[in-house]
Image (cartoon, coloured by chain):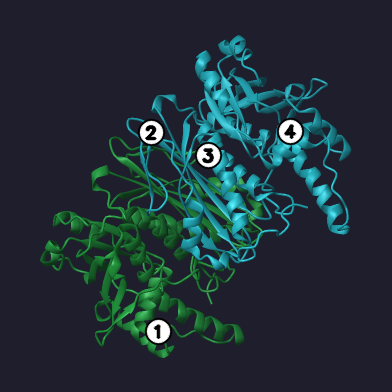
Chain colours: A green, B cyan
Amino acid sequence: MANQEKSSTPIGSMGKFGLISHITRKVVTANKSTVIGVGDDAAVINSGNEVTLVSTDLLLEGIHFNLVYTPFKHLGYKAAIRAISDICAMNARPEQLLVAIGISSRFYVEQIDELYDGISLACSRYKIDLAGGDMTSSVTGLTISVTATGSAPEKDLVLRNGAKPNDLICVTGNFGASYMGLQILERERKLFSKDRSFQPRLEGYEYIIERQLKPEFPAEILDSLRKTGIRPTAMIDVSDGLASDLLHVCKLSETGCRIYYDRIPVDMETIRAAGELGMEPVTAALNGGEDYELLFTVPLENADMIRTIPDVTVIGHMTTFDQGFNLVNEAGSEIELKAQGWEKG
Amino acid sequence: MANQEKSSTPIGSMGKFGLISHITRKVVTANKSTVIGVGDDAAVINSGNEVTLVSTDLLLEGIHFNLVYTPFKHLGYKAAIRAISDICAMNARPEQLLVAIGISSRFYVEQIDELYDGISLACSRYKIDLAGGDMTSSVTGLTISVTATGSAPEKDLVLRNGAKPNDLICVTGNFGASYMGLQILERERKLFSKDRSFQPRLEGYEYIIERQLKPEFPAEILDSLRKTGIRPTAMIDVSDGLASDLLHVCKLSETGCRIYYDRIPVDMETIRAAGELGMEPVTAALNGGEDYELLFTVPLENADMIRTIPDVTVIGHMTTFDQGFNLVNEAGSEIELKAQGWEKG
């Protein structure tokens, strides 16, 4: 479907250091704090009077991506977004990115170029610097490890453990789109693997497929919150799934929660795809994961102000811990909110 | 040979977040700069008036380790050493470690415990904090990504590009031991795979096998250099191989080099193992890799002083770039020093 082998320079022809020089030749830095970027043992960051943040993520072929339908450029972009979102979710500015990849000899230099083109595109879009990494051979496909750093005045940090009972539970964007995009891609891949002349039909699913392959992160919402003077009490990026990540905040904040089924934002394409595949849209929204949206809580007195920020939805409120974790369904009855298990990375 | 499956708790029984809580329950922090460690989106570091350093490494099953003869605890220890050595090689203090792992369902919780026990042991030995990470399922064995951070006053940093012609080329410890340890382990593994009743004979190779499985990093040499007032002009940790890493420093410093065959420190066990396997000990020393020693250059006027530091050997000197990269052999003739290709990660 994607990634036909039109490219022609085998990885082995270049050698590790040749490939590193090749990849890093175009790297320019944008952040004053990047004292030393690629090329030495470690990246050097000047964080002045602020605190430095570091986050790391691992993306594995066959778990986090399938190269049959994932263009390398999108994959690089998504890997960067994944790391950036962890820094943003603490209300900090992402600044540097370190990328380590493991590649087997079945790949071509051109594919690795595309991967780094995607990383560079995300770096330039989110104003961060590629500042280091590692490169190694692999016997088991493509492995990508992404580490992001960032900084913030310590007083501005928003942690996962600060929510209080009665705080409003807010989310950005919508949920389940990435997951349903993946289901559509998987459906077409299975048809394609049975019949190689099959032409995948992806029309009408552009939005949810883009959410899966090339997600964006709502960094601008953090600016809006700052401008309106709203300081969230707790915040997390939704990557494991809305239910799972909300329960995380509840457990760390020692609160319960009550969210409303019909307030969870779900896009029309997500609803249509779920319908076709016989799935419940809200299940995809609650448990799908890879949404790269923000979930945050704000004090009740911010209720009017928060509604003035576009693309933010209040889906419920925090309760005391002994009230448990509740989802109020369309009929008005409460069911227990549960997180998925080990299924997703 | 190692790692019989005496352990009994399947990974899947615990779930991702259960396993993360299980692993992080014993984590305590030692560095004042660790503002927030495991448990939030990112680690938070207070670097005060110093610069922060970040380095990342990737270790893949089948490339960097073979679980047939690598105990999980040693593997964790070595992964930590690998990341720490990059920070030390810039003359900085390592402070935080972030570890992301990908694990398939064939592993047991007890094995992952051992892995983290090894990481913790290295953390406590080198006084660093496990401050974050990621955990994901894998379809392709064990993947470990390690990110280390550290700090230093900016003026203390020693980069790879500061060597000058006539500077002395110094190394710590000895070379080729880890590589020859690996060759012995591989020899025994092959015999074992043909005959399961075979008992591996590893006596007499304890030192080189330990260098392969549980290396240490000569962090104390950095203290000695500081105490004697010697400031290296360039420094690198030797992980890819002595020849390859020296050439790195030469290229970045725009110098040539001349090193002497008979000055390269090689342990007796390394020489004996090389003899048995019909290999040249100096070839193992120059190209073996995974030595986790330091290579650094100092001005010629430090010649007397540098010889007072135990465990440091002067193996040659820098020249002008146009004089090339030379190895003077036992007969006194010069041959060109070359780096290995893609073979090792």
Q: Disc number at residue B62?
A: none
Distance, label 2 to label 3, CA atoms, is 21 Å
Q: Earlier in the sequence, mark 2 or mark 4?
A: 2
Q: What x and y, as percent, mark residue A327?
A: 30, 77
Residue type at mark 4: give it.
Ala
Residue type at mark 3: give it.
Cys
Q: Is residue B181 left or right of residue A21?
A: right
Distance, label 2 to label 4, CA atoms, is 34 Å
Query: If the image is split into quadrants, where does the N terminus of chain A sit?
Result: bottom right
Q: Nearer the viewer, residue B207 or B24?
A: B24
Distance, label 1 to label 4, CA atoms, is 59 Å
**Picture layout, residue B149 above or below residue A314:** above
Q: Are marks 3 and 1 on the same chain?
A: no
Query: Which residue is identified by label 1?
Result: A203
Query: Which residue is identified by label 3?
Result: B123
Q: Secondary structure at mark 2?
A: strand
**Picture layout, residue B17 above or below residue A93:** below
Q: Disc number at residue B51?
A: 2
Tell me if mark 3 has few (under 14), some (14-19) or many (20+) residues whose alpha carbon lies within 10 angstroms of its own: many
Mark 2 or 3, which is nearer the eye?
A: 3
Q: Secondary structure at mark 4?
A: helix
Q: Residue at x 37, y 54 (%)?
A: B41
Q: Secondary structure at mark 3?
A: helix
Q: What x and y, as percent, mark residue B110?
A: 61, 56
Mark 3 or 4, which is nearer the eye?
A: 3
Q: Is residue B149 left or right of residue B280?
A: left
Mark 2 or 4, which is nearer the eye?
A: 2
Tell me if mark 2 has few (under 14), some (14-19) or many (20+) residues whose alpha carbon lies within 10 angstroms of its own: many
Q: Are the two marked residues, 3 and 4, in contact with CB atoms closer than 8 angstroms?
A: no
Query: Which residue is identified by label 4?
Result: B285
Q: Is residue B286 left or right of residue B318?
A: right
